[in-house]
């Protein structure tokens, strides 16, 4: 793990793996998850891209300053990791809260060429309804699988992962009508 000092003095840990001669992909996890949340995607992404995974502040090997933490600061933390590696242009993939962070990074830093691939931003569901929750999870993980297949160049699984996401949407729509 490498570290970079954020603009407020907090040490942010990040890891770099994959093909260093290829396009960079910044991978940002959600709330309560460190960079190990990308463990199953490392092979698929790493064989085609230069990957940077971030331990959000308070998680993994990053410092744990007193909270509360805000998304603006977490975006600046992620951008600091790109700066430390000398990267101006990158794909940004976020899971859950990391999806929101990736969108915000694109908006907060328009001079950079950041291409946000929001895998899983925020899914709002009625958590008391099991079918709706199941649909949201299927949609969520179907989109994750599709993004992994797309970025990993695994063409034969793209249709199956998209079908899982569509099934999730159908289950949600059934509950709405």
Image (cartoon, rainbow, N blue to C red):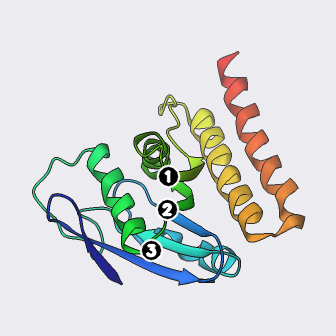
Q: Earlier in the sequence, mark 2 or mark 3?
A: 3
Q: Nearer the viewer, mark 1 or mark 3?
A: 1
Instruction: Identify the residue under disc 3.
Output: 36
Q: Is 34 placed left or right of 47 in the picture?
A: left
Q: Quadrant of residue 46?
A: bottom right
Q: Which percent across, then down, holds residue 57?
A: 26, 62
Badge 1 element: loop
Residue appearing at x 64%, y 82% in the figure: 21
Give the answer, above or below, for where 10 lies relative to 99. below
Residue 112's mark?
1
* Residue 3 rendering spot, x and y as whole percentages: 29, 78
- Which quarter of the rendering shows the N terminus? bottom left
The residue located at (67%, 47%) in the rendering is 138
Q: Secondary structure at mark 3?
A: helix
Judge from the rendering whether residue 174 lies leftward or rightward of residue 37; answer left or right: right
> Which class describes the residues within 10 Å of circle 2: few (<14), some (14-19), or many (20+)?
few
Question: CB atoms at circles 2 and 1 under 8 Å apart?
Answer: yes
Q: Is residue 105 above or below residue 46?
A: above
* Residue 152 vs residue 22, the one in the foreground: 22
Q: Identify the image quadrant of the C terminus.
A: top right
User: What residue is rendered at 53% in x and 37% in y?
Assistant: 123
Residue annotated with mark 2: 88
Q: Position of residue 95 (x, y in %)?
A: 51, 54
Estimate how packed mark 3 is, as few (under 14), some (14 to 19) or many (20 or more) residues with alpha carbons within 10 Å: some
Left or right of 175? Residue 7 is: left
Question: Residue most toward the left?
Answer: 66
Rendered view: 164 above or below 151: above
Q: Position of residue 169 (x, y in %)?
A: 72, 34
């Amino acid at each position: 793990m490498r570290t970079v000092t954020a603009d407020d003095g907090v040490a942010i840990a990040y890891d770099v793996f994959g093909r260093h001669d290829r396009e960079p992909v910044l991978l940002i996890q959600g709330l309560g998850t460190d960079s190990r949340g990308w463990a199953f995607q490392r092979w698929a992404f790493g064989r085609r891209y230069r990957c940077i995974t971030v331990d959000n502040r308070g998680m993994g090997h990053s410092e744990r300053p007193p909270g509360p933490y805000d998304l603006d600061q977490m975006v600046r933390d992620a951008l600091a990791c790109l700066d430390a590696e000398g990267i101006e242009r990158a794909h940004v993939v976020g899971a859950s809260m990391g999806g929101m962070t990736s969108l915000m990074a694109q908006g907060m830093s328009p001079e950079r060429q950041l291409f946000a691939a929001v895998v899983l931003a925020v899914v709002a569901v009625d958590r008391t309804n099991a079918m709706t929750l199941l649909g949201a999870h299927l949609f969520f993980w179907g989109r994750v699988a599709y993004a992994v297949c797309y970025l990993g160049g695994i063409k034969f699984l793209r249709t199956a992962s998209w079908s899982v996401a569509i099934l999730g949407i159908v289950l949600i729509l059934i509950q709405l009508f």
